[in-house]
Amino acid sequence: MANILDGKAIAEKVRAEVRADVAGFTSAHGRAPGLTVVLVGEDPASVVYTRNKERSAKECGIAGTLIRLPAETPEAEVLALVERLNRDDAVDGILVQLPLPKQVREAEVLRAIDPDKDVDGFHALNAGRLATGHPALVPCTPLGCMRLIAESGVELAGARAVVVGRSNIVGKPIAQLLLAKHATVTIAHSRTRDLPAVCREADVLVAAVGRANLVRGDWIKPGAVVIDVGINRGADGKLVGDVAFAEAAERAGHLTPVPGGVGPMTIACLLANTVTAARAREAAKRRA
């Protein structure tokens, strides 16, 4: 049976590290790292997510602020707010919660965020930095996946890694992170020929496609590390991943559950990114 990678427990380890880092930063600079989360509208899931982010930040000693705007807010007002936050020296991290109302273009808003405050890691400049091996703010979910893989103890150098999914938010960045650790990486997707055979080659398999139970147990190489990023609502209303959990548990060496695997890591890594951004900004000030 697979060893289950407990995302809640590992996320708490990350939070403990963040609390220590925040205390050190605050002592050194006379201020706490600052994170501002912007919510436009009343999407129920987004309301919950943003409140959790604000609360989690404050619990770690980060100066967390949630700004809520009405759903009918024009794009120009959202962009003006982002620009004010870009200029605010007390703000180290800016996160605009997605999805946005239809009159606000996501691409324009994400492009407007200062890349050095882009703690979601979605700005094209950060994607380019990651792809070219330069220091970057990395999307939080891939960062959490990498921490889970590290906790499994697998040696990534020379390992075969397969990422099923090619999104800009998860698939592409985690492939870059795995490559940076010297894994041999394949990005697979809906048009991959003989996807099960490709998956069976993986020492590390990351599933991030948003299709419930797509990856079956017999797709998994015995002993592989399997990271399930998918969050899907099953026919019975329960949350399930992209991996058929019970089948996978019979073959995998390490496996993340859904829920309780990758999910808790995302906010923990957002907090870590905020400290990373704060440190980098202070270092840039010293060099100026």
Image (cartoon, rainbow, N blue to C red):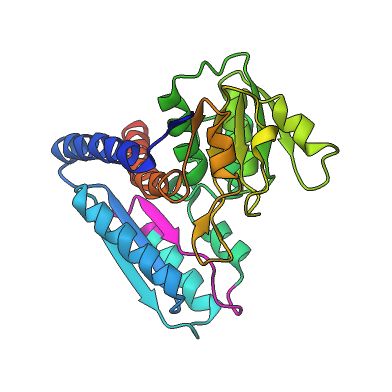
Q: Identify whether 45 is placed above or below 13.
A: below
Q: Is residue 108 left or right of residue 140?
A: right
**Residue at left 61%, top 32%?**
205
Q: Position of residue 93 (x, y in %)?
A: 37, 52
**Residue at left 62%, top 42%?**
207
Tell me which secondary structure the magenta stretch mostly adopts: loop
Q: Position of residue 103 (x, y in %)?
A: 60, 80
Give the residues drawn in magenta, as a range: 86-104
Count the marks. 0
Q: Is residue 233 left or right of residue 51?
A: right
* Depth check, front residue: 5 or 265: 5
Q: Position of residue 96 (x, y in %)?
A: 46, 63
Task: Inspect this view and state whether residue 155 appears.
Answer: yes
Q: Identify whether 88 is placed above or below 18.
A: below
User: Is 90 one of the magenta-colored residues?
Assistant: yes
> Where, quadrant-wise, is the C terminus in this rendering?
top left
Task: Inspect this view and state whether residue 133 appears.
Answer: no
* Depth check, front residue: 148 or 71: 148
Q: Is residue 155 left or right of residue 184?
A: left
Residue at the far right in the pictured view: 193
Q: Quadrant of residue 102?
A: bottom right
Q: Quadrant of residue 281?
A: top left
Q: Quadrant of residue 157?
A: top right
Q: Position of residue 200 (x, y in %)?
A: 71, 28
